[in-house]
Image: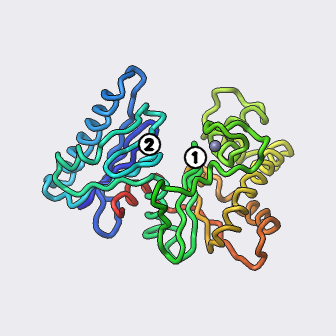
């Protein structure tokens, strides 16, 4: 049995995955670092949460530590070797988490960027199974991605790469966290979508994502809602057309909270990219990711 761990900006989910990619059982816990300023103590907390989740999972399934054949970790940023690195939300610069888990559980531990892990899961077991040349885009707080050509995940040597979120689509556009202006992420992210929806559609400031979605669904035929959604998708389509022109994928699969809107967004996007793509005979299916929140855990066990 393999263990997959998905470290997010505010929670850690750990799962038991069998050899066929089935998630057998899952535990998830929030990481509350609001009272912790010391990087070392955040590291201890992460380790404690993971070990605790593994213990619960093994107990639930009546397994022993010896039954674990491998541990895989999906993490944001640019992990290297056994280290997770540059986790801004958790104030971690570099933490040798892999070595700690290796010592404790005496198994092989692998770490990879979370977008690549989720993409791998979709490629092997989910929405992208039947495609060779394809792209996975996880649009949530930011934009994660994985690119496959001839069935293989593309993996540059120095960093995970394919930072589509920081592809500039307007040189005088919105300021991005990375310091540049007009990054794709500042237009496409669902965090930004929610903030813009609240301000443009005059919702109360503390409206949560589910309420924004409900409002948009119920009022999609109203002029202001339709125009807002159309403008958002025009920006998304510019980024997508760039990706399509470079990789000529047979499909792009969308994960993250964007996927909750796929039934509304994808037909409109499909129409927009037809006009923007360079090679008119390229056919790219726009599809919804299948494994949703479990993709990171499942993919982590395949690295
Ligand atoms: Zn940026």
Quarter of the rendering containing residue 45:
top left
Looking at the picture, how far across and down is residue 269, in whole percent? 74, 61
In the rendered view of the protein, which quadrant contains the C terminus? Answer: bottom left
Front residue of 117/197: it is 117
Residue drawn at 67 percent across, 51 percent down: 167
Q: Is residue 212 left or right of residue 59?
A: right
Left or right relative to 202: residue 143: left
Which residue occupies the extreme front position in the image?
158
| Label 2 to label 1: alpha-carbon separation | 12 Å
Mark 2 surroundings within 10 Å by alpha-carbon count, few (fewer than 14), some (14 through 19), many (20 or more): some
In the rendered view, tell whether residue 13 sits above or below residue 118. Answer: above
Q: Inspect this view and state whether residue 135 appears.
A: yes
Mark 2 or 1, nearer chain start? 2
> Which quadrant contains ligand 1?
top right
Q: Is residue 172 above or below residue 277?
A: above
Name the foreground residue: 46 vs 247. Answer: 247
Is the C-beta separation of discs 2 and 1 under 8 Å? Answer: no
Q: Is residue 110 left or right of residue 229?
A: left
Foreground residue among 301 and 96: 96
Say what secondary structure mark 1 lies in. loop
Q: Is residue 131 visible?
A: no
- Indicate the quadrant where residue 177 lies: top right
Which quadrant: the N terminus? bottom left
Colour style of the rendered protein structure: rainbow
Spot occupied by residue 165 in the image (x, y as percentages of width and height): 62, 49
Q: What residue is shown with label 2?
A: 8
Question: Above or below — where is 247 with respect to 42?
Answer: below
Q: Position of residue 259 (x, y in %)?
A: 59, 54
Q: What residue is at 20 percent from the left and 57 percent from the top?
A: 68
Kindly identify the residue that appears in the image at 76 percent across and 64 percent down. Answer: 273
**Percent x, y for residue 73?**
35, 51
According to the image, label 1 marks what residue? 140
């Amino acid at each position: 049995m393999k263990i997959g761990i998905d470290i997010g900006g505010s929670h850690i989910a750990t799962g038991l995955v069998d050899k066929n990619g089935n998630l057998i059982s899952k535990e998830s816990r929030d990481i509350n670092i609001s009272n912790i300023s010391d990087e070392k103590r955040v590291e201890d907390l992460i380790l404690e949460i993971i070990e605790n989740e593994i213990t619960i999972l093994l107990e639930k399934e009546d397994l022993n530590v010896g039954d674990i054949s491998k541990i895989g970790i999906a993490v944001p940023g640019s992990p290297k070797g056994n280290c997770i690195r540059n986790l801004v939300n958790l104030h971690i610069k570099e933490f040798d988490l892999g070595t700690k888990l290796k010592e404790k559980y005496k198994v092989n531990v692998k770490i990879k960027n979370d977008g690549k892990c989720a993409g791998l899961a979709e490629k092997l077991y989910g929405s992208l199974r039947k495609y060779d040349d394809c792209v996975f885009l996880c649009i949530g707080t930011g934009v994660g991605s994985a690119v496959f050509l001839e069935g293989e995940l593309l993996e540059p040597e120095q960093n995970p790469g394919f930072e589509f979120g920081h592809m500039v689509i307007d040189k005088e556009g919105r300021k991005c966290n990375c310091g540049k202006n007009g990054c794709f992420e500042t237009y496409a992210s669902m965090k930004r979508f929610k903030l813009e929806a609240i301000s443009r559609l005059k919702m109360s400031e503390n409206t949560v994502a589910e309420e924004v979605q409900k409002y948009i669904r119920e009022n999609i035929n109203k002029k202001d809602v339709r125009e807002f959604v159309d403008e958002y998708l025009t920006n998304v389509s510019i980024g997508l057309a760039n990706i399509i022109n470079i990789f000529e994928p047979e499909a792009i699969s969308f994960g993250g909270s964007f996927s909750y809107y796929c039934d509304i967004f994808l037909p409109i996007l499909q129409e927009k990219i037809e006009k923007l793509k360079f090679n008119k005979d390229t056919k790219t299916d726009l599809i919804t990711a299948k494994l949703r929140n479990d993709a990171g855990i499942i993919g982590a066990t395949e690295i």
